[in-house]
Amino acid sequence: MGFRSLVAGCGAYLPLRVMTNDDLAARLDTSDEWIRQRTGIGERRIAAPGELTSDLAVAAARRALDDAGMSGSDLDLIVLATATPDHTFPATATKVQARLGMTRGAAFDVQAVCSGFIFALAVADNALRLGQARTALVIGAETFSRILDWQDRGTCVLFGDGAGALVLNAAPDAGAGDRGVLATRLHSDGRQHDILYVDGGPSSTGTAGFLRMEGREVFRQAVQHLAEVVDEVLAANGYGAADLDWLVPHQANSRIIDAIGKRLGLPPERIVSTIARHANTSAASIPLALAEAAGDGRIVPGDLVLLEALGGGLSWGAALVRW
Ligand code: UT7
């Protein structure tokens, strides 16, 4: 018997401290006008000293479990997407597992940077489809503020901290109809490693390092690859863009989001955008946006939702979900 992954709940958490564009302009050669015009970002949240990726992840996970009417003991899988783990090892997911009171199953991290949530969702979905787990928590959680070069105006203005989580429940395929995770598609191109990377790490420098990016080239490749992968994931189930209720994209740049929305022929009110308030939270951006739109009643059961993201690697992917 095959299984389908149905969405049971979602939740998110943002650190309390708000950093505005004007806060950045007070200590860097930048301006609110430049940041808004080039990226759509108005402000971002920054984790407090001592507030770790696992803390954000646990807060988001608790809200997602509440939304699903479940507790940690109902889970048998946690897949946590992060590029900013608490420690080199063990996986941040295992800390989250312990704090949620989950004592069975497996918990591990997935690392695909900004596309991490799509990769984690695909991994969890595959496990549920195969009957390897019954109830999974998929988390995207990041503290990018810890790997930013705060002297580099080309990167430090772009990112923020946060976490989001989705609970998936396996249901027999036969009774699932057209609901749940319908398709996922993943891609990477390691030849593009050097256009978006961190210049440190345990094996290379022994330091955590800082994020480095050739923004213009990443932008160009993002629009191209995302346009291809959204078509691919729609076609996997015989859908077209006209069938979509919502696009919930990774929030890297409002101009990238607009380009993909335009290509799909979606009006702006069908696109969930949080970039103005969250900036780019890497693997957390999609579940943060999902939790917001499901929480305020925009996304309702039965809606067809397209998720897409691209990040360092390069790695990119898309998922089609019937809520
Ligand atoms: O989530 C992972 C995936 N990441 C992305 O998808 C990010 C993709 N890239 C981008 O979003 C954009 O390329 C950026 C927002 C990073 C940059 O925007 P851009 O329109 O590509 O600008 P640019 O890098 O070509 O820079 C244009 C100018 C430069 O000045 P000159 O050389 O024309 O004099 C930069 O030095 O803007 C300057 N600049 C800034 N000015 C004020 C760069 N950063 C800033 C800044 N404030 N913060």
Image (tube, grey):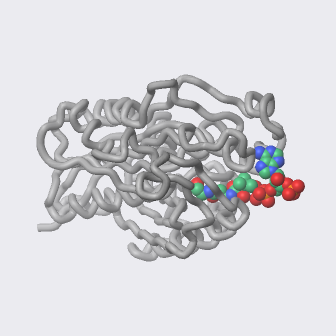
Return the x and y of residue 111 as percentages of the image width and height: 40, 56
Return the x and y of residue 165 as percentages of the image width and height: 37, 42
Return the x and y of residue 42 as percentages of the image width and height: 71, 36
On screen, residue 225 versus residue 59, left or right, reads right
On screen, residue 304 versus residue 46, left or right, reads left
On screen, residue 34 versus residue 156, left or right, reads right
Quadrant the N terminus occupies:
bottom left
Q: Image quadrant of residue 127?
A: bottom left
Q: State the residue in front, 311 or 172.
A: 311
Q: Residue furthest front?
A: 205
Q: Residue at x 36, y 41 (%)?
A: 87
Q: Specify the quarter for ligand 1.
A: bottom right
Q: Look at the picture and state if 40 lies above or below 191.
A: above
| Total count of labels | 0
Return the x and y of residue 140 as percentages of the image width and height: 41, 46
Q: Look at the picture and state if 216 lies above or below 8.
A: below
Q: Residue at x 26, y 56 (%)?
A: 5
Residue 119 visible in image? yes
Q: Residue at x 65, y 58 (%)?
A: 213
Residue 257 visible in image? no
Q: Residue at x 53, y 67 (%)?
A: 314
Q: State the residue in front, 270 or 248.
A: 248
Q: Image quadrant of residue 265?
A: bottom right
